[in-house]
Amino acid sequence: MSLEFFFKYNEYTLEKEKYAKQLLGIPVSDPKDWPVKNNVDILYIVGTGSRWRNNELKYSLRSIAKNGYNINRIFIVGEIPNFVNTESVICIPCNDPTKIKHYNMLYKIDKVIKSTDIGKDNGGKFLVSSDDHFYIKPTNFAEYPIYWRGEELPT
């Protein structure tokens, strides 16, 4: 998945990025050409008040762009940073209703499930991610195991 898919770029930055990809040998493919069946939707939950201007999210998205395969759509719920390409990423702005982090996460997941069709192409399954997750090797999200309370669930 190409970095342009996730981020807004001005022309200069885009040319720099293409040049860097050529130097590093990173393959670039158009996400529109990828098959959609059984691909996984990924949901990012973003809180408010990042001390680092949401750069953690930027680097997590870059890791998916470089190493993620079989991704259908990316959803971001919460505070939407200005670097996110809102034409390619489904954004659901949402403030934290309380000061309790875990309640806010559940509230945001519930809001996305009720207001979108997340997971519709994969039997209702989707991956919840956060800006703390970095994918450092090629990851096939269609075969990503599902865990509940430390146990792998059958798919």
Image (cartoon, helix red, strand yellow):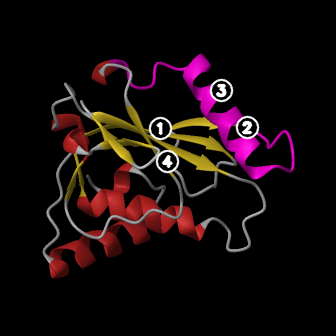
Looking at the rendered structure, the secondary structure element under dot 4 is: loop
- Marking on residue 94: 2
Disc nearer the start of the sequence (3/2) = 2
Residue at disc 2, secondary structure: loop
Residue for point 19% across, 42% down: 143
| Residue 31 lies in the magenta stretch | no
Residue at 43%, 58% (x, y): give it: 61
Report x, y in % for residue 43: 49, 41
Q: Compute the Cα span from label 4 to label 2.
A: 17 Å
First in sequence: mark 4 or mark 2? 4
Stretch of the chain drawn in magenta: 95-120
Give neighbour class at mark 2: few <14, some 14-19, many 20+ (Cα, 10 Å): many
Q: Relative to 69, say whether 35 is above or below.
A: above
Crowd class of label 4 (few under 14; some 14 to 19; many from 20; radius 10 Å): some
Whether the residues at callouts 3 and 4 have beta carbons within 8 Å, the answer is no
Mark sitting on residue 85: 4
Q: Is residue 54 above or below residue 124?
A: below
Left or right, 125 with reference to 37 = right
Q: Which residue is mark 1?
A: 87
Q: Quadrant for residue 73, please give it.
A: top left
Q: Is residue 84 left or right of residue 95?
A: left
